[in-house]
Amino acid sequence: MSSNIRINKICEFCGNDFIAQTIKTRFCSQKCGSKSYKARKRDMTNDVPEETSEGMRSYDLEVLKKQDFFTVMQCCEIFGISRRTIFRMIARNDLDIVKLGRRTLISRESISSLFVVQKPVAEDDENKTIDFDLDGCYTIAQAQAVYNVSQSGLYLIMKKYDIKKITSGKYTYVQKKDLDVYLKGIDHE
């Protein structure tokens, strides 16, 4: 029900003068009302005391050092990751768990094993360098044409029989003698 009352008011959000049609009107427009509401909600979330927010993440380190098993929620809060990430790590067998009824506990050792830095295994220099005589090699395109095989089929055969390849520039080379051993028996049409 509207009225014929016209009241001059000042918008509580933007400070502009406007004509209100009711006594309870506080804002000049829907836009100012929405912005004011969002600002109030934002201020309410920012008013949380710092002690409360820090208390959520700060654990007594002595208590944590004595625990052998952690719950999923403790791991989430300690590491700042989601429950879903923890359960994905469990599914990939990155974390060892113990089930007590419906409760899932994660051992300290499995968490510690996540932080072990693995050094790359140094290969022998003999395995790194392969002597390829480019005269006795096919490029991938040449091998496809000679043996009448698709690129994916050729790569599958190379992977299956561990045939070595070398990349030089924009071409990938494979030794003829290695391919002949496995592809000679294929019927060429």
Image (tube, helix red, strand yellow):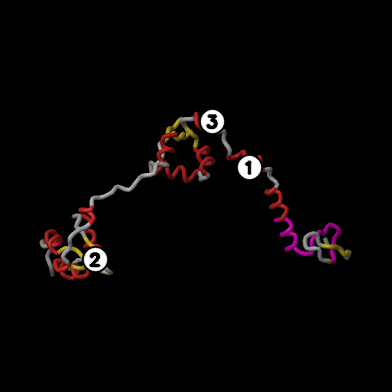
Please identify the quarter of the rendering in which residue 9 is found. Answer: bottom right
Q: Are marks 2 and 3 in contact (CB under 8 Å)?
A: no
Q: Do the residues labelled 1 and 2 touch (CB within 8 Å)?
A: no
Please identify, in this view, whether the residue under mark 3 or under mark 1 is nearer the observer.
Answer: 3
Q: Name the residue under label 2.
A: 172
* Residue 14 image point, x, y percent: 78, 63
Could you tell me which secondary element the residue under label 3 belongs to? helix
Q: What residue type is labelled 2?
A: Thr
Crowdedness near tag 1: few (<14), some (14–19) or many (≥20) residues, C-alpha within 10 Å: few
Residue placed furthest toward the front: 125
Say whether disc 1 or disc 2 marks the residue closer to the N-terminus: 1
Q: Mark 3 points at which residue?
A: 62
* Residue 18 image point, x, y percent: 83, 66
| Nearer to the camera, 107 or 134 | 134
Q: Is residue 45 left or right of residue 10?
A: left
Q: What residue type is labelled 1?
A: Ser
Crowdedness near tag 3: few (<14), some (14–19) or many (≥20) residues, C-alpha within 10 Å: few
| Nearer to the camera, 151 or 26 | 151
Q: Which mark is residue 53?
A: 1
Could you tell me which secondary element the residue under label 1 belongs to? helix
Say whether disc 3 or disc 1 marks the residue closer to the N-terminus: 1
Please identify, in this view, whether the residue under mark 2 or under mark 3 is nearer the observer.
Answer: 3
Q: Please tell me whether residue 3 is drawn above or below residue 50 in the rendered image.
A: below
Magenta span: 18-38
Please identify the quarter of the rendering in which residue 160 is found. Answer: bottom left
Q: How far apart are marks 3 and 1 (CA)?
A: 20 Å
Q: Do the residues labelled 3 and 1 touch (CB within 8 Å)?
A: no
35 is within the stretch colored magenta: yes
* Residue 149 image point, x, y percent: 19, 66
Q: Please tell me whether residue 155 is drawn above or below residue 119 in the rendered image.
A: below
Q: Distance between the residues labelled 1 and 2?
A: 57 Å
Q: How far apart are marks 2 and 3 (CA)?
A: 58 Å
